[in-house]
């Protein structure tokens, strides 16, 4: 690895670690999903809990195993995200709960599952600035472009653009407030 490539890796890893540490805690997430062809809008309110994971934690070792990594302690850090979601304007009355684990190595963010699959997936991770993380995930003929932005200690925004076969299908917009 060249010195420049090594610096980019260290820089991305350090930015992810700082971002995950800064987002640790409990959040209320209000979001809307806009289905582009039909014009349908779905609203979701979630309580989200984010826990920072240090290198070598059991969850990161399990994540490395799921991704068949030779060095099970190669993930620099990560986060465990759990949620409970309500759908206020729909027939769905029972809350939806879930969790996912993220880990980072170089410019790759590893996940234990994807948006539309229970299989492990990876995303390319970059930063526009130290408070704005961008992710690009691609699997099963679908791609997901995400931007997560810390506005202050109290707020963050997220936007997700979902494409299938290269065509934009849905946009998700989120406003999240720390509890």
Image (tube, rainbow, N blue to C red):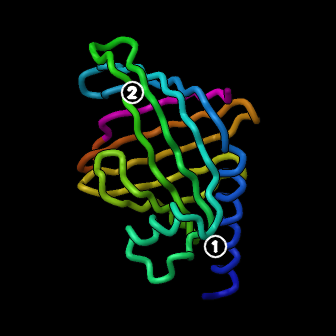
Position in image of residue 74 (x %, y %): 56, 76
11 within the magenta span? no
Using the image, determine if residue 3 lies above or below residue 27: below
Q: Which residue is mark 2?
A: 33
Position in image of residue 48 (x %, y %): 54, 34
Q: Which residue is mark 1?
A: 9
State left or right for residue 122 relative to residue 38.
Answer: right
Using the image, determine if residue 36 lies above or below residue 58: above
State left or right for residue 91 relative to residue 70.
Answer: left
Sequence-earlier tag: 2 or 1: 1
State left or right for residue 19 relative to residue 36.
Answer: right
| Quadrant in the picture for residue 97 | top left
| Quadrant in the picture for residue 162 | top left
The residue shown at (40%, 55%) is 137
What SS does tag 2 mark? strand
Identify which residue, 141 or 84, lies in the foreground: 84
As drawn, which residue projects farthest toward the right?
Answer: 153
Position in image of residue 109 (x %, y %): 51, 61
Q: Identify the image quadrant of the N terminus.
A: bottom right
Stretch of the chain drawn in magenta: 168-179
The residue shown at (59%, 43%) is 50
As drawn, which residue projects farthest toward the bottom?
Answer: 1
Q: Residues at badges 2 and 1 in contact (C-beta under 8 Å)?
A: no
Position in image of residue 124 (x %, y %): 49, 61
**Most common SS among magenta residues:** strand
As drawn, which residue projects farthest toward the front?
Answer: 58
């Amino acid at each position: 690895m060249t010195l420049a490539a090594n610096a980019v890796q260290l820089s991305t890893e350090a930015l992810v670690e700082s971002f995950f540490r800064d987002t640790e805690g409990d959040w209320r997430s209000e979001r809307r999903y806009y289905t582009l062809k039909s014009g349908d809008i779905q609203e979701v309110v979630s309580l989200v809990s984010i826990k920072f994971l240090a290198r070598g934690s059991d969850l990161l070792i399990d994540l490395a195993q799921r991704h068949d990594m030779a060095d099970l302690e190669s993930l620099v850090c990560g986060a465990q995200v759990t949620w409970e979601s309500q759908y206020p304007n729909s027939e769905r009355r029972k809350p939806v709960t879930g969790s996912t684990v993220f880990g980072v190595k170089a410019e790759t963010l590893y996940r234990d599952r994807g948006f539309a699959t229970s299989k492990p997936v990876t995303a390319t991770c970059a930063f526009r600035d130290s408070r704005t993380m961008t992710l690009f995930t691609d699997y099963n003929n679908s791609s997901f472009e995400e931007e997560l932005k810390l506005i202050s200690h109290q707020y963050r925004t997220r936007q997700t653009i979902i494409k299938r076969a290269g065509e934009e299908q849905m946009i998700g917009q989120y406003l999240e407030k720390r509890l």
